[in-house]
Image: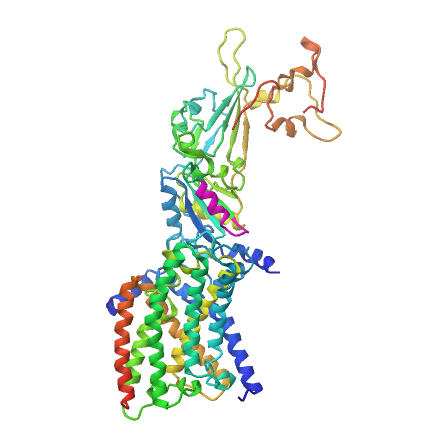
Amino acid sequence: MELSLRSVILGIINLVLMLGLAPLFEGILRKVTARIQSRQGPPLLQPYFDLLKLLGKEDIESGQSPMMQRFSAFLSLATLLTVSLQIPIGGQAPLGGQSDVILLIYLLTLSGISTLLAALAAGSTYSLVGMSREMMAMMTLEPLLAVAIVIGAVHTGTLRLNSILNGSVYASSVWPIAGLIILGIILFALQAFIGRMPFDTAEAETEIMEGPVVEYSGPKLALFKYARMVKLFVYSGLFISLFIPWGRTGFYPLDVIIFLAKVTVLVLIATVIAATHARYRIDQAIRYYAGLFGLALVALIFAVSGY
Amino acid sequence: MSLSSKIKEVILCLNAGRVTLPYPFEVKPVPERFRGRPIFNAEKCIGCAGCANNCPAREILVFDPCQEVRIIKYIGRRCTYCGRCADVCPEGAITMSKEFENSTGNIQDIQQTLEIFMGTCQRCGRCYSGQGPLEALMMKGYRFDNMDKDRWVYQSEAYLDKEPAVKDIDLELD
Amino acid sequence: MLKNLCKKMFPRSLWVYHANSGGCNGCDIEVLNVLTPYYDAERFGIKLVGSPRHADVMLCQGPASRATAKALKRAYEAMPAPKLVFAIGSCACGGGIWYDTYNVIGPVEKVIPVSYYIPGCPPRPEAILYGVAVALGLVDKKVSPVQLKQVELPIPNYHPEDLIGKGEMVVYKKMDHV
């Protein structure tokens, strides 16, 4: 367990970047959505104002079990920040790259479960419906990311994250067929992972039926909103480190800036898709994910047989 | 869900630019026959109370404290800006202005109160119009301006408040 | 410290909950118009949320009727402090034309305390935006109470009990009465 000072500092830089820049990407998303809708949108720093205002509001504890509400609010942000400690932002894995694939998948599933806990703890009708949709979506979505990571593991032969999150899906000997197939699949499913239109059914169903966070107010709501913003950053970061690892110089600050530029491009693509699509019903969405999962299994077969 | 139609949609919307009006910093002129807040003109009013009888929301109240004075009060809370009062007024004392920016924190801000002189000639009983500005200058009677506190008596606050002018009659204006 | 931060950030991001307690939906449509690209309200940071627990401001429209008064009160109590209530339209400000019908209790003020009034039937989207701007302190309000008199009558006619003497020698006695 080598935990040198350098890796700890890298971890802290990761955390600070995640916490500080996640609302900015959400602000870019809202502004570009507004421009596509031909209107002047909110200022770019609007999510910061929202979060700061929510932190100071009164905390009304209602629902079935307030203790579980508090726990799930903290859990949702904590799991995502722990995942962020493992993403190699500048090409250098923080904390020495100590974790492996299983931990990553577990943490991502745990962040979905925290939303379920939140909805169950509130106990109102709307939140239970939102929770059932989120459960259905999660059951069919988590295998997709797991297959992508497992393809990387099959190619490199190890389960350590710092070797997988390095563009390892393309590391086959002949043609990187499996890598290209899984790249297309995850690109099509990216909107579902970050929870925006057209796969908005579970989390921010605030537009339709207030979703799982209907009973939360004040600071706990700030934590949930923050978790949603960090989710955008985390999944974009995972996507980039799995599939687009090129363009890396050796110099750490420049690598960070290149990484952030890639994340911005990905956020812009996600925004354009989100602004032009309508929301899918839950059964349409699940059929879509299941179709993608079938293709992902095909890619897995290619990877296992050496391609 | 074809990709090209979505891209065309994005390009169309971006071509439209930004259609947001820069309100409230620049105001666009309102349409021609727009009905805003009614403005009561005390110079032309003859105190017939036709507006009060016609208001569908019973928003204009009339009270006579003494023989010569009639108080007409427009409370703006329930007013739907229908314009019936302006329609009925025989003298054209009520105009529907084009003001729509009537929001406030205190709802008493919208009210307008008029005190109309309803005197009749004591010999023949015909109404005569109230004083013009010139006659208002030639006030009869003793003047009692407050020299110590430097206050003109007719502008004191007690004269303008909502207490009833005559003490034994209840003024229910709300 | 967090409360001070919230107070400073409050005018910059208002989350709005729309509650219609028995109106004709005219003001509904005008409120929805405010959220369209033409009169964009999101540039002030205003967002429409679906639950009163997330909201800062409740936009009430329609008079408080007998069927919905209880629900309105519960929605108001579900909002976390600090909160504001805007009464939009003549029905919410004073009961509207329907102030004396069989099912209308009165203006929204009889059920929940109101912070700002935006009269109109229905108020233009610009009027609603103006009301919100007045509440945020961006512009000044334009109405004030008006009292007009046709004639300045001598004071003794209003306070006959303070007159002394008769005829030409009548003198008004108490000065501090006015």
As drawn, which residue projects farthest toward the bottom? A173
From where the camera sits, is residue A41 visible? no
As drawn, which residue projects farthest toward the top? B123
Q: Is residue B174 above or below residue C136?
A: above
Q: Is residue A209 left or right of residue C86?
A: left
Toward which corner of the image does residue A298 lie, by quadrant?
Answer: bottom left
- Residue plotted at (49% across, 60% down): A221
Q: Is residue C85 above or below residue B44?
A: below
- Residue plotted at (36% across, 58% down): A129
The residue segment tinted magenta is C70-83
Where in the figure is residue A186, as x and y percent of width and height?
32, 76
Where in the figure is residue C25, as x and y percent of width and height?
36, 42
Where in the figure is residue A85, as x and y percent of width and height?
49, 78
Magenta stretch contains residue C51: no
- Residue plotted at (51% across, 78% down): A14
As drawn, which residue projects farthest toward the front? A65
From where the camera sits, is residue A127 visible? yes
Q: Quadrant of the N terminus of chain C?
A: bottom right
- Residue plotted at (48% across, 62% down): A46
Q: Quadrant of the C terminus of chain C?
A: top right
Q: Is residue C134 above or below residue C154?
A: below
Q: Is residue B50 above or below residue C132?
A: above
As drawn, which residue projects farthest toward the right? B148
A270 and B103: which is toward the camera: A270
B16 and B8: which is toward the camera: B8
